Amino acid sequence: MSAILTADKVTRRFGGLTAINSVTWSLKKGEIHAVIGPNGAGKTTFLNLLSGVARPDGGTIEIDGTRLDGQSAHVFARHGVGRSFQRTNIFDGMTVAENVKTAALVHLGHAFRFVRPFAGYKSLEEEAERALSLVGLLDRRHRLAHTLSYGEQRMLEIAMVLATRPSIVLLDEPMAGIGYDETRHVTQLIAGLKHDHSVVLIEHDLSAVFALADRLTVLVNGAVAACGSVEEVRADTAVQKAYLGE
């Protein structure tokens, strides 16, 4: 499989702190690549760089051979990057369907220019139904978003990402704070995404990571401690001592 997203010697500093230190990394087409590491390792900062939320102080980022480092998150999105965040990023006062339609509308470049009702955009109706069906929330499409359980809100955010039809999906701890049954549901959902997307997954639930990941990168202090298949990384003695435990 060829690489769809690459980072070459990417560095990000905050004052005197180097949060990401010369990281070289790649995401292959059709794979789930998990990024794990202890708290403070730089995982979310790295995801911010890969989505244009933050700009690197050095190094390059390319999508399908097009260099994008230094560009805005909107430009990354136009090149197929969809991103979820650690904290739910939904509109509480809107219905489930309206949340998804808003995400799709923003991606189309019509952000907050609601010159006609959502119902006037047939394609948005279809897109919302498609995305909500994928995450199992179609039967809740008329409910206000704040009435959903926390796990359902996490799945709604993934639906909002999918409504932009990204080729690359970046997920930042999608299972944080949810129960066992919802974790199983989200795990199944992410496993199905690789049929049409390339996925970068940050997740603390290592059992889910080991079940999902095609490749695994371990970040420690902003640098790559190991990268390879799940079996290779789990067998790495340095990683066992630094992160996974004996």
Image (cartoon, rainbow, N blue to C red):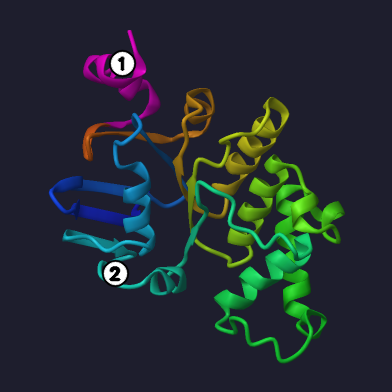
User: Mark 1 highlights which residue?
Assistant: 235
User: Horizontal and vertical percent for residue 95?
Assistant: 79, 63
Left or right of 179 on screen, residue 5? left
**Range of residues picked out in magenta:** 227-246
User: Horizontal and vertical percent for residue 12?
Assistant: 21, 54
Left or right of 189 on screen, residue 71? left
User: Horizontal and vertical percent for residue 239?
Assistant: 27, 21
Q: Main secondary structure of the magenta part?
A: helix
User: Horizontal and vertical percent for residue 163?
Assistant: 64, 65
Q: Quadrant of residue 98?
A: bottom right
Which residue does the image show at 18% across and 53% down from the upper left? 13
Q: Amino acid at mark 1?
A: Ala
Q: Is residue 83 above or below residue 215?
A: below
Left or right of 176 on screen, residue 229? left
Which residue does the image show at 71% across and 59% down from the upper left? 92
In this rendered view, identify the residue nearer to me: 123 or 101.
101
Quick one: SS at disc 2?
loop
Q: Amino acid at mark 2?
A: Leu
In this rendered view, identify the residue nearer to me: 131 or 103.
103
Q: Which mark is residue 114?
A: none
In this rendered view, identify the residue nearer to me: 125 or 65.
125
Q: Is residue 194 above or below residue 61?
A: above
Is residue 238 one of those drawn in magenta?
yes
- Mark 1 and mark 2 lie on one chain; the one further toward the N terminus is 2
Q: Residues within 10 Å of mark 2 (few under 14, many from 20)?
A: some
Which quarter of the figure is the C terminus placed in?
top left
Q: Which mark is residue 68?
A: 2
Is residue 186 one of those drawn in magenta?
no
Quick one: SS at disc 1?
loop
